Amino acid sequence: MVGQSLAKLFESRADDLYVGYGLKPRIVAVSDNGGMACDTAGLDCARLVRAKEQKGTVAAYSDGRGGGGSNGGGGGRTPDISSPTAAEMAEAVSGADVLVETTPSNYKDAEPGMTNITDAMKRRMHVVSVNKGPLALAFPSLNELAAYNRVMFRFSGTVGGGTPILDYAKNSLSGERITSFSGILNGTTNYILSAMAEGMSPKSALQDARKKGYVEADEALDLDGLDAAAKLVILANWVMGMKVTMPDVSCTGIRGVTSADIKRAARKNKVVKMTAACGNDALTVAPVAIPRDDPLCVNGTLNAISFTSEHSGTQTIIGRGAGGTETASAILRDLLYIRQGITSGAYG
Ligand SMILES: NC(=O)c1ccc[n+]([C@@H]2O[C@H](COP(=O)([O-])OP(=O)(O)OC[C@H]3O[C@@H](n4cnc5c(N)ncnc54)[C@H](OP(=O)(O)O)[C@@H]3O)[C@@H](O)[C@H]2O)c1
């Protein structure tokens, strides 16, 4: 979903990315579970998206199953009609500046993202990841690996989708000392708890969220708080300078929240929200009752996070926490950052 959204974004914004930012991205290799496509001259984004949408795999790009059409084939060139060999793929990748990692997040061994990222860094490629798994399990060592290989490692889309939560804390609050933060970082559980606050039973709220496609295939990632915990780990490392991973988070999901809990909170003018919080060196994900007028009380699938700083008080940023297009726009932000780093000469 995110990969396709990025290809669409490159296609639809090609002119203004070039005119406005001097960015002319060239995708030289892509892969999915069905295979791969590569072309050192650059793959055609529209053709790639058609191959994926119509045939289910990017591998269809190069064997003639990619849908053809007027936009087909590397900006008007006749596409190569044979599947790429491993050697061709390796050659395409060897000339690339950046890996954009968009495989599924898993919190057991973080594969295949972990290997993709570490291999790329060792080849001295910059990395943009929207995959939270490797960061949740190994943020400190990945950061060290990036520094050792003198490459940039960016991951804006891992927290808040397109909402620039990480950039806000790191850049807009630079010079401040953030002492704590607390946020609603998982839209799915927020949707379920919001529906329960409106009177739905936990079971119906979950069914409704499933029907709308909000729940991950592995629903434990949402319901047991793992997705929120992964984002908390990324924030704690990046914003607070902590060196922590998933096992450092005390994590309680929403499976135990009952309608009675919701009603009890309502009687005190509070709302139950699953918050991810960092304060006093403790990392916690748990359902808590917060005052109804707290800015964190957003409904539906929205995300919100409040940063408390030493001098500027508490500020809250609210936005959509997921979505293919939104997350692709976060990748674009990271690519622009990397482009700036490369052109500045800081990274040879
Ligand atoms: N969707 C969002 O709103 C959002 C927001 C923020 C972050 N993220 C993160 O972004 C990542 C991608 O999310 P998504 O929604 O785009 O998921 P997705 O639609 O499931 O896409 C994952 C892609 O990875 C490919 N893939 C899986 N295993 C692979 C392997 N071993 N080798 C090569 N390709 C492999 C899949 O190929 P096939 O299609 O062939 O199966 C699929 O194209 C996840 O880590 C997610 O947590 C997503």
Image (tube, rainbow, N blue to C red):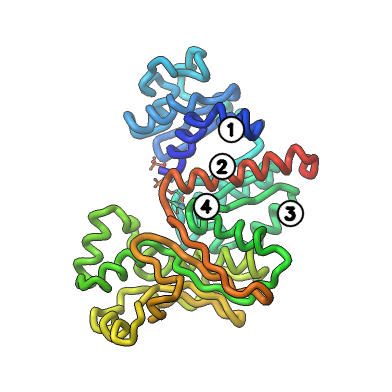
Give the residue pinned by disc 1: 17
In terms of secondary structure, where does tag 1 sit? helix
Which x, y percent locates residue 208? 22, 60
Local packing at callout 1 (Cα closer than 10 Å; few below 14, some 14-19, many 20+) is some
CB at mark 2 closer than 8 A to ligand 1?
A: no
CA distance for labels 2 and 4: 10 Å
Task: Give the image quarter of residue 278.
Answer: bottom right
Query: 14 or 132, which lies in front?
Result: 14
Question: Callout 3, which amino acid?
Answer: Ala
In terms of secondary structure, where does tag 4 sit? helix
CA distance for labels 3 and 4: 21 Å
Q: Nearer the viewer, mark 4 or mark 1?
A: 1
Residue in view at x 41 percent, y 49 percent: 323
Q: Nearer the viewer, mark 3 or mark 2?
A: 2
Question: Callout 4, which amino acid?
Answer: Gly
State the quadrant of the C terminus: top right
Which x, y percent locates residue 337? 66, 45
Give the residue pinned by disc 2: 332
Residue in view at x 41 percent, y 31 percent: 49
CB at mark 4 closer than 8 A to ligand 1?
A: yes
Question: Which disc is residue 157 wearing?
Answer: 4
Local packing at callout 2 (Cα closer than 10 Å; few below 14, some 14-19, many 20+) is many
State which tag comes first along the sequence, 2 or 4: 4
